[in-house]
Amino acid sequence: MSSNQEQGSLHSQASEGKRRQHGSQTAQRGVDQADDAKQQQHQELEHDGQVVQPEPIADDADSALGDEISVYTASVRESIYDFPERYGRTYHAYKEGRYSLPNDEVEMDRLDVHHHVILLAMQKQLFFAPLPADFSGRALDLATGTGIWPIDFACQFPNATVIGNDLSPTMPLIVPPNCHFYVDDIEADWTYSENEKFDFIHARFLAGAIADWPKLMAQSFEHLKPGGWVEFQDWNTWIYSQDGSLPPESALNRFHALTCGGRHAQGFNMRPGPHLEKWIQDAGFVDVEVTKVLLPLGSWPKAQQQKELGVFNLVQMMKGAEAVCLAVLPMLPPEAGGPWELEEIQVFLADIRKDMSNRKIHGVYDFWIVWARKPEA
Ligand SMILES: C[S@@+](CC[C@H](N)C(=O)[O-])C[C@H]1O[C@@H](n2cnc3c(N)ncnc32)[C@H](O)[C@@H]1O
């Protein structure tokens, strides 16, 4: 038994048998809204030469998207399945309140769509770190969500040992034999022993989830073997347009300003992507490599690959907008225009979704992929 199990991390089991096997590949806190606005302006001016060209549409064309979108042990504590319910959504029970988004079927579907979006953006690669083709070491996926990434990784490297952890036991029951899941809090002190060090640590899509990024980087460094690789992939969860087509007063823009600002005020950075490189360097990693990819929102891009990416991104954002609003708006203090009532949120969501599917608004997000190596000595 690993020290992790001994010290309270729990094997996972799919919630009430609802989770299914994945279609896998083989199978600063405190950033205020003024800063956000400045950064948006900056982003519109500078985007490293990467541009997403919109497909021309007739002026009278319908701006709506329309039909384009057409384990393992029995010894799991009951309490981690006793998911609290709010607004008709369920949330994690272990360390309740630690994370703000739901863990229900709608959210799990969204995470799987998001996985597909990122695979499209990364040319079907799960990671960019230069692992050997016959990698057979120990890999850890932090805050794994549905477990789709470690399952794909375990299929690609059948001789590797792959571990995924999360606050929620939301992984499927049927997984490759070299893939293991634990319920754990990655912000707590890790309990892996000296002989459980990893060769690769991966984390993706933790915007808004982490209170102490430098600590997370430091623990990743400590629990890697010398020469091991780390890879963080994350959003700058801030939409912008490269051609001025996103009106500042639009519901879509307000959605990002309110929710990013509100979550920052709660102590969680919604825009970690641009900071990953520095955090990783500060933790002591070397050979740091950085790639930024653009994720358009919607079917408006001209190029087929970007259009497909944009459509899947739209699907996950349409599903995610409600959860993000519910995580922040009812708790906004009066000085920030809150708290919002549920009815107000529903009206706002209708406007947000209308903007999201408006092909005349060419919204884009930046997604960062940063990988680095722990020095040999
Ligand atoms: C947006 S999801 C991303 C899931 C997965 N990494 C992916 O890319 O599909 C964020 C995940 O982080 C988990 N999470 C948030 N805070 C956590 C913590 N302190 N410890 C472990 N998991 C955490 C949530 O339960 C959720 O599954």
Image (cartoon, rainbow, N blue to C red):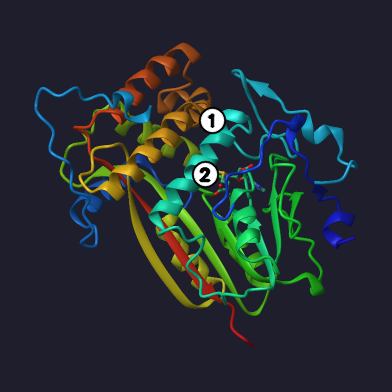
CB at mark 2 closer than 8 A to ligand 1?
yes
Q: Which residue is drawn at 49% across and 38% down?
A: 263
Residue 71: x, y in percent? Answer: 80, 46
Q: On the rendered image, what quadrant is the C terminus found in?
A: bottom right
Residue at the left extreme, as displayed: 59
Is residue 271 at least partly visible in the picture? no
Residue 129 lies, in percent from the top left, at: 51, 71
How packed is label 1: few (under 14 Cα within 10 Å), some, or many (20 or more)?
Answer: some
The numbered mark, 2 or 1, whose residue comes first in the sequence reads: 2
Query: Is the C-beta separation of discs 2 and 1 under 8 Å?
Result: yes
Q: Going by the image, does 263 lie left or right of 226?
A: left
Residue 46 — which label?
A: none
Q: In which quarter of the image is residue 158?
A: bottom right
**In the rendered image, which residue does mark 1 sit on?**
327
Q: Quadrant of residue 201?
A: bottom right
Quadrant the N terminus occupies: bottom right
Q: Which residue is drawn at 23% across and 48% down?
A: 303
What's the residue type where badge 1 is placed?
Ala
Up-down relation of residue 90 to residue 263 (above or below):
above
Give 161 or 195, whichever is nearer the viewer. Answer: 161
Judge the density around disc 2: few (<14), some (14-19), many (≥20) Cα neighbours within 10 Å.
many
Q: Mark number for residue 208?
A: 2
- Residue 277 % position (x, y): 45, 67
| Residue 26: percent from left, percent from top | 57, 55
Furthest-front residue in view? Answer: 27
Question: The residue tagged with tag 2: helix, strand or loop?
Answer: loop
Compared to residue 283, the image places residue 262 above or below, namely above
Q: Is residue 149 visible?
A: yes
The one of 127 and 176 positioned closer to us in this rendering: 176
Secondary structure under badge 1?
Answer: helix
The alpha-carbon separation of the residues under discs 2 and 1 comes to 10 Å
Residue reaching furthest to the bottom: 377
